[in-house]
Every structure is written in C-alpha cells, then in structure tokens.
Image: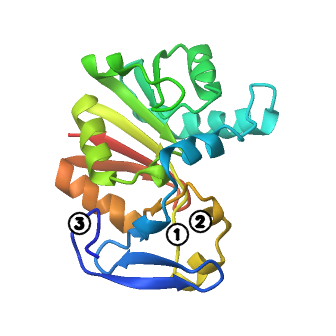
Amino acid sequence: MKCKICNGNTYIIYDKQFDINYYRCKVCGFIYEDPDKHLESNLEKEEYGTHNNSIEDEGYVNMFKRFITAFEPFVVGKDLLEFGSGPEPVFSEILRQEAYEVTSYDPYFLPDESYLNKTYDIITSTEVFEHFSQPIEEFEKLTGLLKTGGILAVMTQFPKDDEHFLKWWYRRDYTHISFYTIKTFEYLARTYGYDIMYHNDKDYMILKKG
C-alpha cells in the first residue's frame, strides 16, 4: 500500500494479538490501518455514541482549555469552525464562552453542511484526524475553508517508534485508523502552504495558512 498522505512506500507493522496490519510510510511516518479492518459507518456511529463527555466533567473541560491556550496566541479572528464536534459539543460551548463565533459540524451528530458556505479564521479539530479514512481529502477540504492567515488547530496523538505503536493504548480504539507523526504534518505544511506555529511533540499541532 502507498502512503495515504504522501504516496510514499510503506512497510507493515503487524499486530499479532488482533491480527491487524498497519502500513507505516517510510517517508513521512504516517500509519494507516488495513482498510479491511475499518468499522462500517453504523458501527462507527454507535461507538462514538458510547463516549460519555459532558460540560460537568472538569478534567474534560480543562483538556479543551489547555488546547485553547496553545492556539490562541496565533489567532487573528473569532470566526471558528469546530470540525467533528461529536455527540456532545462540549468544546463548542467552551469556545463560545471565550467569545468565539462557533459553527459546529459533525458528520454523524451535526450533519448540516451549510458550514461549507463560508470561510473561517480558525478551524479546530480535536480527536478527529485519527478517524479519517481519506485524510488528504479531509485536509484539502479544511484548507479550502480556511482564510489566508487562518489557523488550523489539530489535537490528535502522535505515534512514536514501531515498538511503542504496538503497545500504544491509543490505537486500541476501533475507530482510530489514521496516525500522524510530526514529519507527516511537516509534509502537509510544505505541500499545502502552511507554517507550523507550534506543536508539543505529543498531541497538539497548530498550523497557519500562508
């Protein structure tokens, strides 16, 4: 399989316990689960619906507030798209409290596609990129919705080496199929005209569209 991001050659990381192949790019490090193991959309939605996240969960709320602190220094406008808001749009509510003008979209829970009719100063995507079956198509769509000078703020866990990946709790979620390294995002930035403003080498990537 060619890399779904850069079309580079890949090699297989095999999970013996669950009999799953993952394809890791030799160029950008992107890891993609064998498509034959992807959940059908109805099962994927059912899995998302089991996530119990609420505005009353202090730890969950603080996670989002830390993320806002990371991207806020680079933001030049308040018109924001929250892409992939989930069954409980907690982050949208927190962003509104911070005076952002929020449009929320989720393909399963808030499927109104009127969000495509405008462009945004900032697009946030928290714990969403790992669900993309067609990551380049999704990235290109978000790029088209972002104003020049706008910020794309992504939260997704970054894998390390292969040994770490095979022991990694993050890939145990059946809906997690795409995994991005810093090199993956460096490739995306070069290809689509972004500057990397900040990353924490763990799960934050803040990009500015040139």
- Give the x, y percent position of residue 37: 49, 66
Q: Is residue 161 left or right of residue 12?
A: right
Residue at 33%, 24% in the rendered image:
121
At 43% from the left and 70% from the top, the residue drawn is 34
Are the residues tagged 3 and 2 within 8 Å (C-beta)? no
Quarter of the rendering occupied by the C terminus: top left
Decide: few, some or many residues near mark 1? Use Cα within 10 Å; few <14, some 14-19, many ≥20: many
Question: Is residue 148 visible in the rendered structure shown here?
Answer: no
Per the rendering, the mark at residue 159 is: 1
Pointer 3 local density, CA inside 10 Å: few below 14, some 14–19, many at least 20: some
Q: Identify the mark nearer the N-term, 3 or 1.
A: 3
Q: Amino acid at mark 3?
A: Cys
Q: Which x, y percent locates residue 67?
A: 58, 39
Residue that carries the numbered disc 3 in the rendered image: 6
Q: Is residue 189 above or below residue 72?
A: below
- What's the amino acid at mark 2? Arg
Q: Is residue 168 above or below residue 83?
A: below
Q: Could you give the CA–CA distance between mark 3 and mark 1, rounded to whole angstroms?
A: 17 Å
Identify which residue is drawn at 26% across, 38% down: 141
CB-based contact (under 8 Å), mark 2 and mark 1: yes
Badge 1 amino acid: Pro
Place residue 122 in its image quadrant. top left
Locate residue 177 relative to residue 139 in the image: left or right: right
| Contact between labelled residues 1 and 3, with CB atoms less than 8 Å apart | no
Q: Is residue 64 left or right of residue 204?
A: right
How packed mark 2 is, by other alpha carbons closer than 10 Å (few <14, some 14-19, many 20 or more), is: some
Give residue 171's mark: 2
Q: Nearer the viewer, residue 113 or 98?
A: 113
2 vs 1, front mark: 2
Q: CA distance from mark 3 to mark 2?
A: 21 Å
Left or right of 8? Residue 153 is: right
